[in-house]
Image: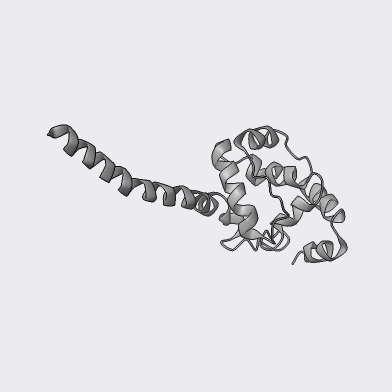
């Protein structure tokens, strides 16, 4: 009699916990953004003029050009993050589509292994690398990505 009751209780617990755990996993990248990124990029990803480039409406544009995908993981805030490679990959897979514009298709999600390898290759001049990638983008995209003058 005890075994069926215990089994039923476990099944009920799993039925209750599984959706909560799934919801928690979906929130984890957003929470990681809030605790690791928004201090500089601000809650909506607009950045700080002349100091921190905006991500909102621009981040996925880097996926349009060779080296852009790698650049996104190699920027200091990402590469130096205290997040482990798996959490950082999850953050990038949430962040790139969240900040837009629309992802080029097909989008290949970042993996922990890819993030681990890329983040070890530090950028020497982030601004120059960013500008070089922007110059490879189509003209309308390039114009939209131009940094405003420093205040």
Q: Position of residue 113 (x, y in %)?
A: 63, 33
Q: How is the image coloured?
A: one colour
Q: Look at the image and tell me in which quarter the N terminus lies.
A: top left
Q: Looking at the image, which residue sits at the far left? A: 1
Of the pair 62 and 77, the residue shown nearer to us = 62
Report whether 1 appears left or right of 8. Answer: left
Of the pair 90 and 78, the residue shown nearer to us = 90
Q: Look at the image and tell me in which quarter the C terminus lies.
A: bottom right
Of the pair 44 and 127, the residue shown nearer to us = 44
Report whether 148 appears left or right of 14. Answer: right
Q: Quadrant of residue 40?
A: bottom right
Q: Quadrant of residue 80?
A: top right
Q: Position of residue 58 (x, y in %)?
A: 72, 60
**Residue 149 in view:** no
Q: Position of residue 114 (x, y in %)?
A: 66, 35
| Identity of the residue drawn at 82% across and 49% down | 128
In the figure, 94 relative to 86: above or below?
Answer: below
Q: Quadrant of residue 60?
A: bottom right
In the figure, 54 relative to 37: above or below?
Answer: below
Report whether 7 appears left or right of 87. Answer: left
Q: How many marks?
A: 0
Q: Position of residue 14 (x, y in %)?
A: 31, 43
| Identity of the residue drawn at 70% across and 45% down | 75
| Identity of the residue drawn at 73% across and 42% down | 70
**Residue 80 in view:** yes
């Amino acid at each position: 009699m005890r075994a069926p009751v215990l089994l039923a209780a476990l099944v009920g617990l799993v039925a209750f916990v599984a959706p909560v755990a799934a919801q928690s996993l979906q929130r984890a990248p957003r929470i990681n953004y809030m605790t690791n990124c928004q201090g500089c990029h601000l809650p909506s990803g607009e950045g700080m003029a002349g100091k921190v480039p905006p991500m909102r409406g621009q981040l996925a544009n880097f996926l349009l050009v060779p080296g852009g995908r790698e650049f996104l993981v190699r920027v200091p805030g990402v590469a130096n993050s205290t997040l482990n490679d798996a959490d950082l990959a999850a953050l990038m897979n949430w962040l790139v589509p969240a900040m837009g514009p629309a992802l080029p298709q097909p989008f290949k999600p970042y993996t922990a292994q890819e993030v681990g390898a890329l983040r070890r290759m530090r950028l020497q001049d982030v601004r120059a690398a960013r500008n070089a990638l922007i110059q490879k983008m189509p003209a309308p995209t390039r114009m939209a990505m131009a940094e405003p003058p420093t205040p």
